Image (cartoon, grey):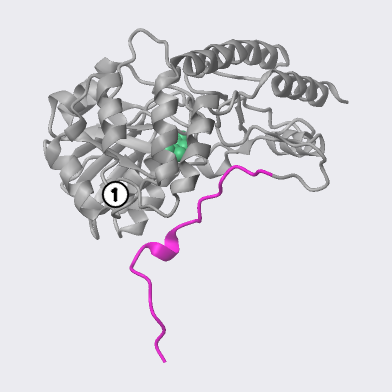
Amino acid sequence: MTLPQPRPGIMDIAIYEPGKSQVQGARRVIKLSSNEAALGPSPKAVAALAGSLGESHRYPAGDSGEVREALGKAHNLDPARIICGAGSDELLGLVMRGFAGVGDEIIHTAHGFAMYNIYAKGVGATPVVAPEKDLTTDVDAILARVTPKTRIVFVANPNNPTGTYIPGSEMRRLRAGLREDILLVCDDAYAEFVDAPDYESGFALASETENTIAMRTFSKIYGLASVRLGWGFGAKNIVGVMERIRSPFNVSRPAQFAGLAALADRDHVARTKAHTKKWLAIGLQRLRGLGLKVGESHGNFLLPEFPKVPGKTAAECDAFLQENGIIVRRVDGYGLPNHLRVTIGDEEEMTVLLDVMAAFMERK
Ligand code: PMP
């Protein structure tokens, strides 16, 4: 008997491991493992979610029309060039299914977001890894890996889990150096946290070219990871392909209502950003003060590097944090076995986290 066989590449996929959410035996858990928003969702988004539930028997708007209109207004973009998805994750998968297949190559950076590799294998394409320089996207390394088979290049900017970014000029140099038929995906999941003056969101390139798409999400600064809402902005020829292959009601009604309310609550976004920036700075200073190597982060997380000294390793710190009810993210799977990724939490969570980290580093 021959059992059903998966398509080539699928069994090579290491299943995505989400940040843990539970610790055995811990009464109260501090979860800083999934880059979720420190202050939670806007109360207005929560009210909109609750208000939408009575209509649960209705299918949602299939084209997320109101959300696309509101996003277009908020960002001064043409709504006809916006596509919404169940998280930006869905959209990354649609890009892959629409533009790459068996025998094609896609390029992502060495410590880039894990799903690029997984989606590539899912369609039978070959992921090609471009090394980074100082944990930062290296445009020349990407360009050096382009072959006639290259179809898509994925760059998270800022990147998760490194927290580093490349300036607009570098992204433009990348676009200019890629063949016209190669799609560039600017994954801007953390764009709203960035203050660096030379940063440029992917919107500009996606407006000016017909082979670039910018991705955004409501999972990070808007605090709506659970409802699943992401969006992309690109030329009609790119978005039109994705529209053809997405499922008909891919964004739920609660997600559409919550997204609209969250987008309108600019005060909540500003509060979340200010809080995150404040604790990034405090965290950076405290962790460096403990002797850890930590780079500046442009997302909502820090990535301390631990010494390879027995008693002080990343794995041992992770175990110590868990004993104290704190979950952060091991990043071995991203090729970073000596680092831990720590999401910025609320004030109490950050105070406890930094004290427990200090206790770990100071213990004999
Ligand atoms: N891109 C990057 C760089 C991310 O870090 C994440 C979430 N961890 C995503 C995309 C996916 O986010 P979502 O599907 O929740 O929009």
Q: Is residue 29 above or below residue 140?
A: below
Q: In this view, does 94 lie above or below 303?
A: below
Q: Is mark 1 on a helix, strand or loop?
A: helix
Residue shown at 76%/34% (left/top)?
Answer: 321
Residue shown at 40%/10% (left/top)?
Answer: 196
The quarter of the image holding the N terminus is bottom left
Give how far across and how far down residue 36 sits, in percent. 55, 32
Residue 19 magenta: yes
Q: What stretch is highlighted in magenta?
A: 1-21
Give how far across and how far down residue 251 sits, in percent. 37, 45
Give how far across and how far down residue 254 sits, in percent. 44, 42
Q: Mark 1 points at which residue?
A: 94
Residue shown at 30%/40% (left/top)?
Answer: 64
| Residue farthest top in this picture | 197
Quarter of the displayed picture in which ligand 1 can be seen:
top left
* Residue in front for this viewpoint, 233 or 182: 233
Is 315 placed left or right of 260 in the picture?
right
Query: Which image quadrant is residue 206 in?
Result: top left
Q: How crowded is mark 1: few (under 14 residues within 10 Å), some or many (20 or more)?
A: many
* Residue in front for this viewpoint, 126 or 120: 120
| Residue farthest front in this picture | 54
Is 287 placed left or right of 58 in the picture?
right
* Residue in front for this viewpoint, 245 or 331: 245
Give how far across and how far down residue 123 sits, in percent. 30, 58
Residue 175 magenta: no
Tell me the chief SS of the magenta region: loop
